Structure formats: C-alpha cells, structure tokens
C-alpha cells in the first residue's frame, strides 16, 4: 500500500527537548509515510537572545535535512504570527514557497498533524491543501507568554478546520469537547525499551540520588522543591535546560547539573538515579498538561514523586503525589516503608501499555478510519 505524505507542523525545533512532536513525526516516517517535520513557525516576536537562532534559521531555511529512518526536517523562513503586516507577508510571499518546498519533498495532498494553533498554521494548512487535518492538542496555548492576542480565536478556527482532534490530557479534552464533541484522548507515551534498560540494578532505598530531567523553566517547575530536596541531603541530579534566572541552583551543594543531553543518550545520563521528581507549579501553564516524561520515569521502575496536577489523578496508584517542598522531602524519606515489588512491577507494566508504538497505532487507526469513511 502506498502511504500518503504526512506534514507535522511542530511547535518546537527538531533539536529541542525531545517530545511528542518529534516522536509522532519519527513514527510516521518509520511506518513508511513520506514525512516532513516543519520546525516551529513561532508564537511571539523573538527577543535579542533569540537572534542567533533566527539567523541560523535563515541560513538553513533552503535545505531540509532527512534524519536516518526519520522525517525530512524543514526549517521554515517565516515572520512571527503577531503583527498584521507579518501575517500578510507570510500569506502572500512566504507560504507559497514553503508549500512548494514541502510538496517537492513528499508530494501533494498530505495528512497534516498540527500543533501551534496560530494564524501561520492556519495559512500553511490552506496552502498545503491537505486530504486530512489532525489537530493534536498538547498544550493550552492561551497561557503561554507573549502569544498573539487572538490565539484563542485562531485555535477555535483550527478546531473547526480539523477533521480529527486529539488531546493529550483529560483537562484539555474537557475544554475541547465544548467545541468538538468528537475529540479523543491520546495521552503521552514512552519509548519503553529505551528507559526500561534502567530497571536493573534496583534503586537504593532510602534514595541517595534523585533526579529531575527536562526543560526546567520558572513558569512550570517548582524550584523551591528542588532546593529543599538538595538541602535535606539528597543528591539532586538535573538533566536538561535550566532557566537562566535559576542558574545558581547548579552551583549549590548536593546538586549535580548535567546540562542538556540528546534524547538517545538520556538513559546514560539517568543511570544511578534512585527516584524521579516531577515538581510542577499548578497554574495556567501546567493545569492542562500531562507531562511527557511521566511514562519515561515509570518505565525505569523507579519511584516517581509528582505535584498533584489534574493529569496525575488517574496515576495516583503508580505515582506518589506530594505538595510543596515539605511534601516531597517527606515522601522521599518514607520510600523504604512505602515501596513494594508489586508497585514496581505495576509501574513498569503501565509504561509498557503506553509505549509509543501503541499510541501511534491508535492515532494511525483513527486517521485511516477517517480517510476510509470518505469512500
């Protein structure tokens, strides 16, 4: 069977922290779909610190690059979706070129998987003339800093335009079903074998080394928890980007900062960890998310201590829920009493049931049903 082309309109760069956007594109490509991963077309006007990245984008915008067994990566040359004049220039001058480049790479009439619900995304969808649009809603963009003022309006347009809508958390699903009663749940997933390699040897209890990995931004992460954990005497390992305003944390006693690590080398950076922390603030940015790293942590079999985000409610049998610095520290100290072999096996089993191949088959099946239903 000849598979149709797929275009993933991502909200991140290919080389950014590995997450759903890159995983979905990679799985389509490995399943035999000619796939283009369009890097982020932006949400806000870039500040001075982003200018080197903007210049790099300009330099490489003419050449998509194909990864091994992965999608063609296309760095778009577009203006931010903020000012009316920028949007007009995108629509009239830049979108036609992008559509031609993408068509040359994978062919006409693609399946489009859309992420950021901006005017740029809507205009590019129109230029691509897709056979089907899936809006894979992974964030509540209304709470992102400096987003276009009409982001709620353009998201409603995308919800109306999409043939299929999936949501990564129940909170997002409840919001979305007010406009799209047919929206479905498609939660986060894990490259199970990748992280299951860390199941042996078993962790030390009480834990000596605890870890947070991922993008540690002030808007989402509770740094008070991280400081309290390190201050209590646990060795705190941080892996990933660290908010510039919190860089001093890396120099504090008992803190081991590994920096950003490519996804393929992440298990190596996590070796020797006894427990994982998911210390999120509960606010507009986080209330609707289901952290992608949850199942990655569970796949290791290690105990996971998390803030009580709404998405964690269904995982309370597998994740220790803790509130604030004292709650996290107390939970860590009690792990020798609360950990059981059955609990470890249940975590591993849940992660295996939520592997990326399982999640991809669900998404692919919904797309094929929709295409088949058109006769």
Image (cartoon, grey):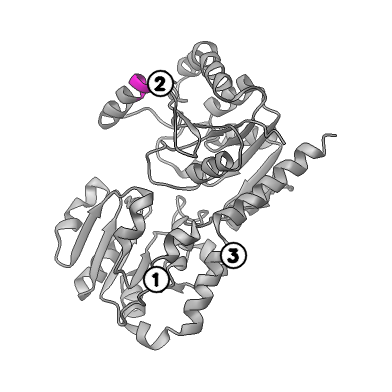
Q: Secondary structure at mark 1?
A: loop
- Asked if 318 appears above or below 40 in the picture, the reply is below
- Whether residue 180 is visible: no
Residue 285 within the segment the image draws in magenta: no
Q: Between tags 2 and 1, which lies in front?
A: 2
Q: CA distance from mark 3 to mark 2?
A: 39 Å
Q: Residue at x 34, y 73 (%)?
A: 328
From the image, tell me which residue sits under label 2: 61
Quarter occupied by the N terminus: top right
Quarter occupied by the C terminus: top right
Residue 260 % position (x, y): 29, 49
Q: Along the polypeptide, which appears first: circle 2 or circle 1?
A: 2
**Which is the main secondary structure of the residues drawn in magenta?**
helix
Q: Along the polypeptide, which appears first: circle 1 or circle 3?
A: 1
- Range covered by the magenta-colored residues: 57-62
Q: Residue at x 46, y 67 (%)?
A: 298
From the image, tell me which residue sits under label 1: 323
């Amino acid at each position: 069977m000849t598979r149709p082309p797929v275009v993933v309109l991502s909200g991140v760069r290919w080389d950014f922290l590995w997450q759903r956007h890159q995983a979905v594109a990679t799985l389509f490509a490995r399943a035999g779909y000619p796939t283009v991963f369009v890097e982020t077309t932006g949400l806000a006007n870039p500040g001075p610190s982003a200018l080197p990245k903007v210049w790099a984008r300009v330099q490489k915008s003419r050449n998509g690059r194909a990864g091994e067994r992965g999608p063609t990566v296309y760095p778009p040359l577009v203006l931010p979706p903020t000012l009316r004049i920028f949007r007009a220039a995108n629509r009239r001058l830049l979108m036609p070129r992008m559509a031609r480049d993408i068509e040359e790479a994978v062919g006409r009439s693609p399946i489009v998987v859309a992420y950021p619900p901006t005017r740029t995304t809507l205009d590019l969808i129109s230029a691509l003339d897709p056979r089907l649009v899936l809006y894979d809603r992974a964030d509540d963009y209304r709470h992102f800093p400096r987003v276009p003022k009409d982001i709620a309006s353009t998201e409603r347009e995308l919800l109306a335009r999409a043939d299929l809508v999936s949501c990564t958390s129940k909170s997002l699903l409840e919001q979305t079903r007010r406009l799209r009663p047919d929206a479905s749940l498609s939660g986060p997933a894990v490259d199970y074998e990748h992280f299951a390699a860390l199941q042996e040897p078993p962790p030390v209890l009480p834990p000596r080394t605890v870890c947070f990995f991922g993008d540690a931004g002030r808007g989402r992460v509770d740094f008070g928890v991280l400081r309290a954990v390190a201050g209590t005497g646990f060795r705190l390992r941080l892996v990933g980007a660290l908010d510039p305003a919190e860089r001093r944390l890396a120099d504090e006693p008992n803190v081991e900062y590994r920096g950003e690590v490519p996804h393929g080398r992440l298990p190596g950076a996590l070796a020797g960890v006894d427990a994982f922390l998911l210390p999120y603030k509960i606010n507009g940015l986080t209330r609707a998310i289901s952290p992608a790293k949850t199942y990655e942590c569970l796949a290791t079999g290690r105990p996971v201590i998390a803030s009580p985000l709404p998405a964690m409610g269904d995982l309370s049998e597998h994740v220790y829920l803790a509130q604030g610095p004292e709650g996290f520290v107390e939970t860590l100290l009690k792990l020798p009493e609360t950990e059981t072999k059955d609990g470890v096996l249940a975590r591993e089993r849940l992660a295996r049931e939520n592997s990326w191949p399982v999640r991809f088959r669900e998404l692919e099946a919904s797309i094929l049903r929709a295409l088949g239903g058109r006769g």
